[in-house]
C-alpha cells in the first residue's frame, strides 16, 4: 500500500525558478527519502532525512520534515532543464525490515 | 563501483514462456529488492532479500519466483505471465542496518517487460 502522497502531481516552471514539492504520509516513520526518476529510467537517491531531523540540505536541494503534520517538502533552487524528471518521496515505516514505500510522485518540467 | 546492473534491458515474452531477469551489484550490499513499476505509477515493492534470504514477499503471484544465488546476484524467474504484468521491473540494493531501518537504495536502470 502507498504511504506517501506527493503534491502537486505535476509542476511546470521556468529555468532558474525554484520548485517545491510536498509529500504527506500516514504512519510514523524511521526516515523519509526523496528519489528522482528520469523518464523510463532507474531511480536515483537524492536525500534522506531521519525522523529526528527537521531540515537537511544537499547542494541545490533542501528537504524539510514535520513529523507532527506527517509531511515533508523538497525544494529545488535555481532549477535547470536537467532537473526535469519525476520526484518520489519514500518512507521507511519500520513495519518490517527494509520496507520502503513510494508515494505517487511529482512530475517536474523545467522549461529552458 | 556504485552500479546495479540489470539484464536484459527489454524483454518481450508470450504468456507460455519462461524467462528470467537478472540483477548484479558489487557494492557489498546485503539487501536486494525487486520493485515493479507500471507507467506513470510509483514503484511497488515485490520482494526483499537480506543476507540472501527472502525477508519480504508482498503477496506477489507465484508466477514470479525470486532467487538470490549469492550476495551479488538477484534473479526474477517469470513463468505463465499475463499481459497486465507488463511493466518496468527495477532491482535495487542497500546496506543492511541492524536496526532494520531502510537506508539509501541504489537502483538499476530496470528491465522493461512486455507480455503478449
Image (cartoon, coloured by chain):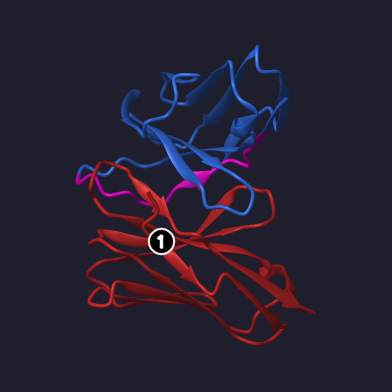
Chain letter for the blue colouring in the rendering: B
Q: Is residue A46 left or right of residue A79?
A: left
Q: Residue at x 64, y 34 (%)?
A: B86
Residue closest to the far right: A112
Specify whether residue B90 is in view. Answer: yes
Q: Residues within 10 Å of mark 1 (few under 14, many from 20)?
A: many
In this rendering, the answer to whether A64 lies above or below B78 is below
* Residue occupying the far left of the picture: B99
- Which residue is more in the foreground, B52 or B114? B114
**Residue A68 quadrant:** bottom left
Q: Quadrant of residue B100?
A: top left
- Give the residues drawn in magenta, as a range: B99-112
Q: Is residue B113 above or below residue A16?
A: above
Residue receiving disc 1: A33
Picture coordinates of residue B79 (x, y %)?
A: 57, 15
- Give me the residue at 22% from left, 70% from top: A52
Please tell me whether residue B102 belongs to the stretch shown in magenta.
yes
Q: Which chain is disc 1 placed on? A: A
Residue B4 screen position, x and y as percent: 56, 38
Q: Which chain is red?
A: A
In the rendering, at what x and y percent does residue A57 appear? 43, 76
Q: Residue at x 47, y 26 (%)?
A: B72
Image quadrant where one finds the N terminus of chain B:
top right
Say if the magenta span includes residue B75.
no
Amino acid at each position: 500500500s502507498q504511504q506517501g502522497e506527493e503534491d502537486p502531481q505535476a509542476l511546470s516552471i521556468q529555468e532558474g525558478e525554484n520548485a517545491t514539492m510536498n509529500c504527506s504520509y500516514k504512519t510514523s516513520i524511521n526516515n523519509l527519502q526523496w528519489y528522482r526518476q528520469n523518464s523510463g529510467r532507474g531511480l536515483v537517491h537524492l536525500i534522506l532525512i531521519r525522523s529526528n531531523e527537521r531540515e537537511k540540505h544537499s547542494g541545490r536541494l533542501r528537504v524539510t520534515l514535520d513529523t507532527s503534520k506527517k509531511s515533508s517538502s523538497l525544494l529545488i533552487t535555481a532549477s535547470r532543464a536537467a532537473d526535469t524528471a519525476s520526484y518520489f518521496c519514500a518512507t521507511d515505516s519500520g513495519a518490517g525490515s527494509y520496507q520502503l514505500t513510494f508515494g505517487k510522485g511529482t512530475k517536474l518540467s523545467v522549461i529552458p | 563501483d556504485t552500479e546495479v546492473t540489470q539484464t536484459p534491458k527489454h524483454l518481450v515474452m508470450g504468456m507460455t514462456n519462461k524467462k528470467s531477469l537478472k540483477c548484479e551489484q558489487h557494492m557489498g550490499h546485503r539487501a536486494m529488492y525487486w520493485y515493479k513499476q507500471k507507467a506513470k505509477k510509483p514503484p511497488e515493492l515485490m520482494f526483499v532479500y537480506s543476507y540472501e534470504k527472502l525477508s519480504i514477499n508482498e503477496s506477489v503471484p507465484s508466477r514470479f519466483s525470486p532467487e538470490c544465488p549469492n550476495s551479488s546476484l538477484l534473479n526474477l524467474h517469470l513463468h505463465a505471465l499475463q499481459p497486465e504484468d507488463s511493466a518496468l521491473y527495477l532491482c535495487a540494493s542497500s546496506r543492511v542496518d541492524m536496526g532494520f531501518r531502510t537506508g539509501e537504495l541504489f537502483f538499476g536502470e530496470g528491465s522493461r517487460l512486455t507480455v503478449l
